[in-house]
C-alpha cells in the first residue's frame, strides 16, 4: 500500500528546490500531510533546544587559546536563562563583577584598542558554538592586516547585542563587533549574527549599528561576512560613523561567470533560450 496515496501534491512543489521555506507542502484532506507535520514539530524542537542550550564559554575559551587569542569570561546582569528571556534590558548590561573585571583590564592596557571583540550566546548558543571560532579567525586575519589592535575576546553569557557597547566603552575601544546567536527560525536554529558599532557607548540604539546576519554554512559564508565587516570598519574609520548612515556597499567578486547576467532575472521564467523556444 502506498502511504502517500491520500496526499494531494501542491502544483508549486517544484519551487521547494529553491528555498528551505515551508511552501507547497501539499495536503491530506484539510490538513498537512503527516510527514510535513512531523518535520515542522522536529524543526520547532530544534529551535527550542537552541534557545535553551547552555553557553559553552569554557570550550570557546580553549578554542580561542588554540588560535592565539586571550579571552575574558563575563556575564550580563541577567542572572539566569529565565531572567534573560523575560528581561531583555538586563541582557543589555553587564553584571557588576564583569564591570570590575573590565576596569582592571583597562588599567592593564590604558591605551585602549582599535577593535573590541565580543561573543555572546544571544538566543542561540548553538550558532555561536558552530560558527564563532572560524569567523573570528577570518576577522582576526583581516584586522591585523589593517594594523588594528584587538582586545581580548569578551565571552558574555546571557548577553544581548547592546552589551557590546558597554564592553567596548569600558575597554576604551574605538570600534566593537559582537558575534551573537540569532533568534532561531524553523529552518535555521544555528544562524549567527554580527553587529558592528563605531564609537560605542552605553545607551546607543540599533540605529548606530550595522548588522550582518544569517552567517552559517547554508547562509552567508564566513569569508563573505568578514569581507563585508572589513568594508564597514574601513568606512567607519574614514567617515567616523556607523549604523543607518553607513551603507554596506562592499564590492563582491562574482563566483560564476554567468552570475552577473542572471541578476534581476525572475527565476520563475526560466532561461532565455527556453523562453525563446516557448515563444516560437
Image (cartoon, helix red, strand yellow):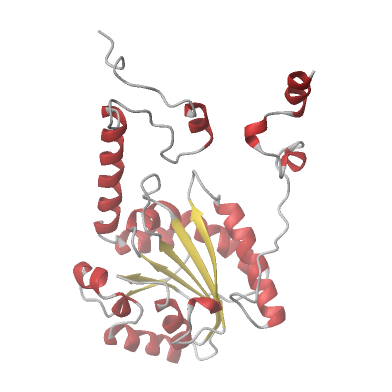
Near-viewer residue (245 or 101): 245
For image coordinates 31% across by 14% down, the residue present is 5
Which residue lies at the image location 67% right of the left edge and 66% below the top edge? 231
Q: Position of residue 88 (x, y in %)?
A: 31, 75
Quarter residue 273 falls in: top right
Q: Farthest residue in the front direction?
A: 30
Q: Is residue 145 left or right of residue 72?
A: right
In the displayed structure, would residue 272 be above or below residue 248?
above
Count every numbered label the image shows and give the total.
0
Q: Is residue 213 left or right of residue 8?
A: right
Image quarter hosting the N terminus: top left
Question: Of residues 245 and 251, which is closer to you in this image?
Answer: 245
Q: Nearer the viewer, residue 134 or 8?
A: 8
Residue 115 visible in the snapshot: no
User: Could you say where residue 249 lies in the image, as x and y percent from the top left?
Assistant: 70, 63
* Residue at figure coordinates x 73%, y 57% from the top left: 251
Q: Is residue 156 above or below residue 268?
A: below
Q: Residue at the location (76% across, 43% down)? A: 260
Instruction: Give the side of residue 223 with respect to residue 202, left or right.
Output: right
Looking at the figure, which quarter contains the C terminus?
Answer: top right
Farthest top residue?
1
Which image quadrant is residue 74 in?
bottom left
Residue 97: x percent and y percent? 27, 85
Q: Position of residue 189 (x, y in %)?
A: 36, 50
Residue 63 visible here? yes
Q: Quadrant of residue 89?
A: bottom left
Above or below, comparing residue 11 to residue 180 in the picture: above
Amino acid at each position: 500500500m502506498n502511504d502517500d496515496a491520500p496526499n494531494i501534491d501542491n502544483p508549486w512543489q517544484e519551487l521547494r528546490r529553491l528555498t528551505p521555506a515551508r511552501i507547497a507542502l501539499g495536503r491530506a484532506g484539510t490538513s498537512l500531510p503527516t510527514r510535513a507535520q512531523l518535520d515542522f514539530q522536529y524543526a520547532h524542537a530544534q529551535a527550542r533546544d537552541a534557545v535553551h542550550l547552555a553557553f559553552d564559554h569554557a570550550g570557546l575559551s580553549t578554542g580561542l587559546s588554540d588560535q592565539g587569542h586571550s579571552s575574558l569570561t563575563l556575564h550580563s546582569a541577567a542572572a539566569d536563562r529565565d531572567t534573560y528571556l523575560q528581561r531583555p534590558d538586563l541582557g543589555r548590561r553587564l553584571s557588576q563583577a564583569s564591570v570590575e573585571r573590565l576596569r582592571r583590564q583597562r588599567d592593564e592596557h590604558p591605551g585602549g584598542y582599535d577593535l573590541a571583540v565580543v561573543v555572546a550566546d544571544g538566543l542561540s548558543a548553538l550558532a555561536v558554538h558552530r560558527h564563532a571560532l572560524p569567523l573570528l579567525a577570518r576577522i582576526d586575519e583581516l584586522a591585523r592586516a589593517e594594523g588594528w589592535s584587538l582586545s581580548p575576546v569578551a565571552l558574555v553569557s546571557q548577553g544581548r547585542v547592546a552589551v557590546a557597547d558597554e564592553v567596548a566603552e569600558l575597554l576604551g575601544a574605538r570600534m566593537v563587533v559582537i558575534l551573537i546567536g540569532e533568534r532561531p527560525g524553523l529552518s535555521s536554529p544555528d544562524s549567527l549574527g554580527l553587529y558592528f558599532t563605531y564609537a560605542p557607548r552605553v545607551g546607543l540604539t540599533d540605529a548606530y549599528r550595522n548588522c550582518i546576519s544569517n552567517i552559517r554554512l547554508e547562509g552567508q559564508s564566513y569569508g563573505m561576512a568578514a569581507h563585508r565587516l572589513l568594508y564597514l570598519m574601513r568606512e567607519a574609520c574614514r567617515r567616523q560613523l556607523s549604523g543607518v548612515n553607513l551603507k554596506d556597499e562592499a564590492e563582491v567578486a562574482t563566483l560564476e561567470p554567468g552570475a552577473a547576467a542572471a541578476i534581476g532575472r525572475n527565476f520563475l521564467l526560466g532561461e532565455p533560450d527556453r523562453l525563446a523556444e516557448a515563444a516560437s
